[in-house]
Amino acid sequence: MARAKRIYELAKEFARDDKEIIEFLTAQGIRVANRLSAVSEDTYNMLKAKFTEQPKVEEPPPKVEKPVEKAAPKVDKAAQPEASPKKKKAKAPQTPDAVQSANPQIQPQPTATINAATQAIYNEAIKAGNEFIAQYSPSGTKKNPPAGTVMSANFSSYGLLLTNRFANADDSPADYWKAVNKLTTAAFKKMQHFGLAHREELAEMREAIKVIGEDYVPREIFTDEENDRFAKQQHFLFMTFGHGQGAINDQLLALKIYCERMSVKFEQMNFVEYISDPNCELNVTPRVPFDKMAEVITHSARSFPRRFFFYKKYKTIVDFALKTFFEWVDGYQKLKESGADAAKLQKYLELEEKFIYLTEFMSFDNLLHVPKKEIIPYVNAVEVLNAYRDDLDNPEAEAKFKYDLRGKVMYFLFKPKEFVFIWQLGGF
């Protein structure tokens, strides 16, 4: 070839379309820009061999006319002897060449078609593999949805952060307060959704817990230290069993207002002062790391449904515990009014403190179950402690308390942590 020919010239020479030649070259891995691109001598020879060969004309298979079946004469079967069944000759397996000659329409597929089909299968395999990895663990078991996407006792910061994207929240103060505001709003919405879903049961719970949630009323006969002691215990029991949606919502709302106030400060700031003065208020304002802030918010939020489901399951036991607390306070008042000495009053307060520890331990689902038994170790332990309280003048009261604690409580325990707790509570 004297000079390199261009695509449009080859199209005229081979009586082909420009696009057909370009597509063929692209499939062969030869890059050409357009119909004005020139090709090398080797490429020209390849195109010539491709587009000047005579196309094969496939001859249609000859039509075979089906003979018309003539009606066979009737033959008397009784007069004819039965013919023995003929054995069919086994056909020899056909080779690919034999199949090709017998079926002239079957032609070998072009390589490009096979490659495209293989690529499609390969892509489908990758897609199926990705879906398997997303839905199944390495052990082959199906993964559960991440806990926390819905408000529950298992609600976690992972679930809250999963549904709300917070990118680089700690990079700048402005981004930080915007992210905390968004996080607070998300937690608030989940709390509201949970409250609406259980509004009737929550109303019943609030009514039952109201007695422990009211402000402690100081008693004149008690000292300031004693009133402060019982006030703190009453508040502790409320936080343990009744700290509910209203209190948490107030905290979330206060945090949200603070975030908005900080955002306004950044809008009104003197950015020259912010950059140049290291003592600028917005530079030195301490901030909790965002991941810790998220954990604090979600931990507080999920504590509400945990207490709700606990009260719903053990309503009778919680009511018993709250009633017993006020009995202890009333008993101490009667003891002081009777003129008891300081040693007896001190012993009474020590036992009352044991009751608080016992109730706190129970609030985490301890001392409430005995396999195949109808007793409740917590109730038994409180009754044994109450018996010790009411018999303080008896010198044998402590020994009886330890004896009953073994026989009525420890004997039925199968959890090591419960056994150790009661052992320490009894002073063994």
Image (tube, rainbow, N blue to C red):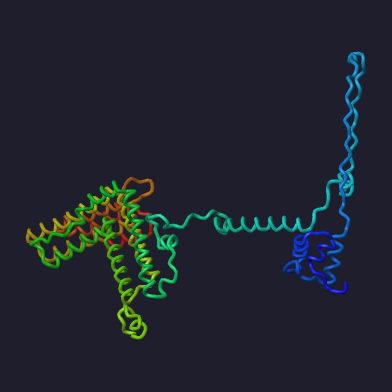
- Residue at image x 35%, y 73%? 288
Relative to 381, say whether 253 is above or below. Answer: below
- Residue at image x 34%, y 85%? 278
- Residue at image x 86%, y 67%? 45
Compare residues 19 and 223 and report the one nearer the observer: 19
Relative to 183, say whether 84 is above or below. Answer: above
Q: Position of residue 403 (x, y in %)?
A: 27, 56
Residue 52's quadrant in the figure?
bottom right
Compare residues 89 and 175 and report the one nearer the observer: 175
Number of numbered tags placed on the structure image: 0
Compare residues 72 and 205 and report the one nearer the observer: 72
Q: Seen in the image, is 191 located left or right of residue 63?
A: left
Q: Quadrant of the N terminus?
A: bottom right
Q: Position of residue 32 (x, y in %)?
A: 74, 68
Q: Is residue 167 something one can see in this rendering?
A: yes
Relative to 302, say whether 104 is above or below. Answer: above
Residue 246's quadrant in the figure?
bottom left
Q: Position of residue 371 (x, y in %)?
A: 38, 48
Q: Quadrant of the C terminus?
A: bottom left
Compare residues 252 and 93 and report the one nearer the observer: 252
Q: Seen in the image, is 54 located left or right of residue 225?
A: right
Q: Is residue 428 something one can see in this rendering?
A: no
Q: Position of residue 235 (x, y in %)?
A: 22, 61
